[in-house]
Amino acid sequence: MLPRPHLLMFPKARIFWPLASLLVLADCTTKELAVDHFSPAQVPHDVIGSAVRFTLAYNAGSAFGVDWGPWSRAVLILIMIASLVVLTQLYRRAEPTRRIAAVALALVCGGAIGNLLDRVSSARGVVDFIDVGVGAHRFWTFNVADAGITIGALLLAVLLSRSEWARTRES
């Protein structure tokens, strides 16, 4: 007896759900390890010389430390939830065989969920700990979720620009 079509998992789902879940798990685990092993905050621990360091930091604001005062936490939680709703719609609209789109959306969603969990569970903010730079010239401190969001967003941008370019060529 063949399985019913609605019970079959689309290729995008076989990629999306495990990858998003793995990213959330990796993000939560690494943040917990960072808090346990790199406290107190703002003390650098060299990993690859001073180029890559683990420096525990708490980001109560948004990306790049942007802060909106006493309402930051609530506003950012609402923005993250709204973003996840939009991302869910993008996932649903993606063709079942769009594997690369599933990877990109899984990275962005998994990262957003990881940071949302941090923001909801602690008034201190999102735990950041990966500190990259050369000497006094440092990149901002980030976490596994941020890396997933960035890579996923870049991949989505490439996919969107390629599809837009293809539509332009067809016209």
Image (cartoon, rainbow, N blue to C red):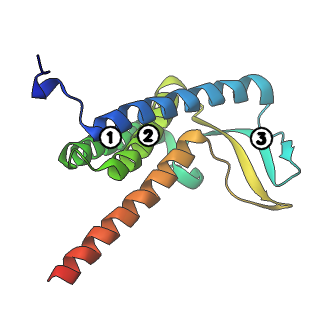
Residue at 24% across, 30% down: 9
Residue at 68% across, 48% down: 141
Left or right: 6 as drawn, with respect to 152 = left
Can residue 31 be seen here? The reply is: yes
Residues marked 2 and 1 touching at CB (< 8 Å) = yes
Residue 70, placed above or below residue 166: above
Q: Quadrant of residue 143?
A: top right
Kind of residue at badge 3? Phe
Residue at 28% across, 39% down: 11
Kind of residue at badge 1? Leu
Instruction: Return the residue at label 2.
Output: 112
Name the secondary structure under disc 2: helix
C-alpha gap between disc 2 and disc 1: 7 Å
- What is the x, y in percent for residue 158? 39, 65
Q: Which residue appears farthest toward the front when viewing the image?
A: 1
- What is the x, y in percent for residue 128? 65, 40
Q: Residues within 10 Å of mark 3 (few under 14, many from 20)?
A: many
C-alpha gap between disc 3 and disc 1: 29 Å
Residue 104, placed above or below residue 3: below
Disc nearer the start of the sequence (2/3): 3
Instruction: Return the residue at label 3.
Output: 54
Residue 16, placed above or below residue 103: above
Left or right: 13 as drawn, with respect to 48 = left
Instruction: Return the residue at label 1.
Output: 84
Relative to the observer, which residue lies in front, 13 or 39?
Answer: 13
Residues marked 3 and 1 touching at CB (< 8 Å) = no
Kind of residue at badge 2? Ala
